[in-house]
Amino acid sequence: MKKVLVLAVALVFVCGLASAQDVMPAAKAGSKSLNFTFGGLGTFNLNAAGPSGGVGMSYFLNSDAALRVGLQIRSTSSTIPANPPTGQTGTDGSKSAFTLGIAGDYLMYMNAGRVRPYWGGGVLLALNSNDAKPAVIGGGGQSEDKNDQANGPTGLTFGLSGIMGAEFFIYNELSFSAEYQLNLININSPADNVLSNGNTSTTTKQTSTTTILGFSSAGVAIHIYF
């Protein structure tokens, strides 16, 4: 699937270059664009710009300034096979995670040409949760570990970021962009960790963290103007 996507993007890029002289960016006061953000530079283990990618929309206040919002809803789950030895029974385990994120940005563009560098700032809110049940061999009960930071992000995250990127128009109403985001401040307030085993459960408060100044993300996006 990734190879097909890369090929499609390459074909659109080549076709756009062939008609370079005819491109007049459709970015002006009142213009809107749908933004589809993809995973970032995976080789370097970087996420996509915004709340780990997703879909969003931009609204142009004028040709040089825009407001942008992004939304991501992500749910993942996997099974952990018990694989009991011959003659024994087993219960498969599982892992799951859920993310709901929203980001709002203010962007300033440096020119009105076909290649439009931009900079700005943004705010991010994300809600995360996770759940893990280990595989069990034999007749023992299965425990459940909710919102353990060892299994991934949990709780509420608030962040402020600085943004720098560039947008390249392939056609009047179609463009690609690439950007970096720098964490100015990132505050995570994790949910309580609840470990249940049979009729007993243990609740453990987890440590909040605050990060000031740090590399946040890198990503690419496709923009469709209307």
Image: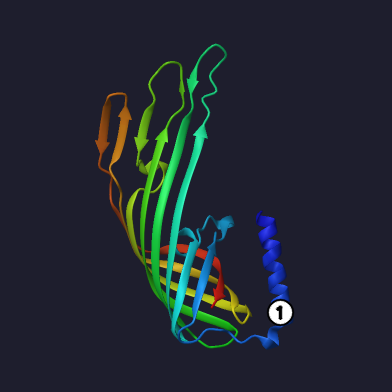
For the point 28% across and 51% down, which residue is it? 208
Badge 1 is on which residue? 17
SS assignment at label 1: helix
Residue 71 drawn above or below residue 162: above
Q: Is residue 12 left or right of residue 114?
A: right
Residue 52 drawn above or below residue 141: below
Residue at the top extreme, as displayed: 87
For the point 45% across and 64% down, which residue is it? 50
Where's residue 176, x and y in %? 59, 73
How many labels were placed on the picture?
1
Q: Amino acid at mark 1?
A: Leu
Where's residue 206, x and y in %? 28, 44
The colour scheme applied to this rendered structure is rainbow
Q: Quadrant of the C terminus?
A: bottom right
For the point 51% across and 61% down, which residue is it? 48
Residue at the front extreme, as displayed: 226
Q: Quadrant of residue 106?
A: bottom left
Where's residue 69, x and y in %? 42, 69
Where's residue 105, x and y in %? 40, 72
User: Crowding near pointer 1: few (<14 within 10 Å), some, many (20+)?
Assistant: some
Residue 22 drawn above or below residue 42: below
